[in-house]
Image (spheres, rainbow, N blue to C red):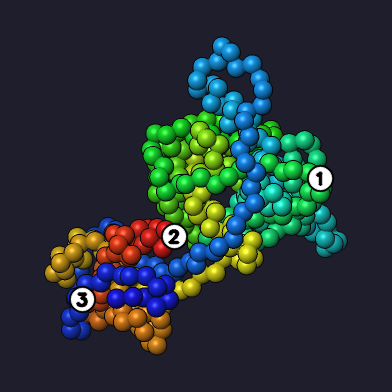
């Protein structure tokens, strides 16, 4: 069967039953969320070819040190410092510009396009982009996407300036344990380099009360305030992630940082440049993530996937043939329970990619 709104092949099990309301055995895990999809833009970035490392005396350095020196020399000029001004209100209720936050960014296009985090430029009245040569330019927000925390800022360089860019790498084939390099502006210390490894992949991380960023890269590279929006690089100097947040009780690096993967950042940045926003459609249905308790009770042939809950009448999901549940049961503990619906279709795969959870569902759509 094909979902009309996404043009994707969806594997579905038909498991419909009659209507009744019963109590379902308690299970800790419960997730219900609205599904969405994204289009893929075709914007082409104009990038500079990677240069050979600037001539320095590398005698006496280890291979690891030479690798670090090479990546830094080739990429530092493409890392920018982003500072903002915000508007506050004084005692006389008059608007007063004042210094806002600061962060990092990576030049991804020779025309002056910079990728950074949405939270770096949020609520900014003015944005300034500082280059490695000390020059500063006023930037404008091309577009921002809260769902991925990716934004694009544009500044206009002089006609005779040849901007250095960082080329996007492939984040789909990262391996836990591989070396990564971060360059950014922690605490305003411009173009600081730190190294580490990929500590984990596919992390769903809650960035705000209503937003979960999926498929994030976890790294032990030292990331501190001011690194946000800066590039996470592989040992070839390719951008594999945008450093976004850390897990810390103190606000300083605790060896657990998270980056938006390059494949997501590239797709979102391209669409922001092309359209000014990320176009997302909504599948007119709700889902609950299957677990063994639900699967056993409903006597399903599978115990993982997404169980369709409700389908909007005359919506795109209904037109595609998706069916929701009709058998209402109460699910959860006595203090914290909800009604879910059994008997609906179960989505187990999209375009041949197994979907075992809502996180997997969104990851399949992202791919």
Q: CB under 8 Å between callouts 2 and 3?
A: no
- Circle on res. 126: none
Task: Name the residue that disc number 1 marks.
Answer: 160
Local SS, label 2: helix
Local SS, label 1: loop
Task: Name the residue that disc number 2 marks.
Answer: 366
- The structure residue drawn at horizontal position 41% and vertical position 42%, both measured from the top left corner, is 174
Give above or below for 244 relative to 361.
above
- The structure residue drawn at horizontal position 37% and vertical position 70%, both measured from the top left corner, is 8
Local SS, label 3: loop
- Residue 347 screen position, x and y as percent: 28, 69
- The structure residue drawn at horizontal position 25% and vertical position 75%, both measured from the top left corner, is 345
Task: Name the residue that disc number 3 marks.
Answer: 14
Q: Nearer the viewer, residue 252 or 271?
A: 271
Mark 3 or 1, closer to the camera: 1
- Residue 236 screen position, x and y as percent: 52, 35
Q: Earlier in the sequence, mark 1 or mark 2?
A: 1
Q: CB under 8 Å between callouts 1 and 2?
A: no
Residue 138 visible: yes
Give above or below for 106 relative to 334.
above
Q: Circle 2: is it few (<14), some (14-19), or many (20+) Cα within 10 Å? A: some
For residue 171, side relative to residue 166 (left or right): left
How far apart in space, not on screen, are marks 1 and 2 (Cα)?
38 Å
Q: CB under 8 Å between callouts 3 and 1?
A: no
Mark 1 or 2, closer to the camera: 1
């Amino acid at each position: 069967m094909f979902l009309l709104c996404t043009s994707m092949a969806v594997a579905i099990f038909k498991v419909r039953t009659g209507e009744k309301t019963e109590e379902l055995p308690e299970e800790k895990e419960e997730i219900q969320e609205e599904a969405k999809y994204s289009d893929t833009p075709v914007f082409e970035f104009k990038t500079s070819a990677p240069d050979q490392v600037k001539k320095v005396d590398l005698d006496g350095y280890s291979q690891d040190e030479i690798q670090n020196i090479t990546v830094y020399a080739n990429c530092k000029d493409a890392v920018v410092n982003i500072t903002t001004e915000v508007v506050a209100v004084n005692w006389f209720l008059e608007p007063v510009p004042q210094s806002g936050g600061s962060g990092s960014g990576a030049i991804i296009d020779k025309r002056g396009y910079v990728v950074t985090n949405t939270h770096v430029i949020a609520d900014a009245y003015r944005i300034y982009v500082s280059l490695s040569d000390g020059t500063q330019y006023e930037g404008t927000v091309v577009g921002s996407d809260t769902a991925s925390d990716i934004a694009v800022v544009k500044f206009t360089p002089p006609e005779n300036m040849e901007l250095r860019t960082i080329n996007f790498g492939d984040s789909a084939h990262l391996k836990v344990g591989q070396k990564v390099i971060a360059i950014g502006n922690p605490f305003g210390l411009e173009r600081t380099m730190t190294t580490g490894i990929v500590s984990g992949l596919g992390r769903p991380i809650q960035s705000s009360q209503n937003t979960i960023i999926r498929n994030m890269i976890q790294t032990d590279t030292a990331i501190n305030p001011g690194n946000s929006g800066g590039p996470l690089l592989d040992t070839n100097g390719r951008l594999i992630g945008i450093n976004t947040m850390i897990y810390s009780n103190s606000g300083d690096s605790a060896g657990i940082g998270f980056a938006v993967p390059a494949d997501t950042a590239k797709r979102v940045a391209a669409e922001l440049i092309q359209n000014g926003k990320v176009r997302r459609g909504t599948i007119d249905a709700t889902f609950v993530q299957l677990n063994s308790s639900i699967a056993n009770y409903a006597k399903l042939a599978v115990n993982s996937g997404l169980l369709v809950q409700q389908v909007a009448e005359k919506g795109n999901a209904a037109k595609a043939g998706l069916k929701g549940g009709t058998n209402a049961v109460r699910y959860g503990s006595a203090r914290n329970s909800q009604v879910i619906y059994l008997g609906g279709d179960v989505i187990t795969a999209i375009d041949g990619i197994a979907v075992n959870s809502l996180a997997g569902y969104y990851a399949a759509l992202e791919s």
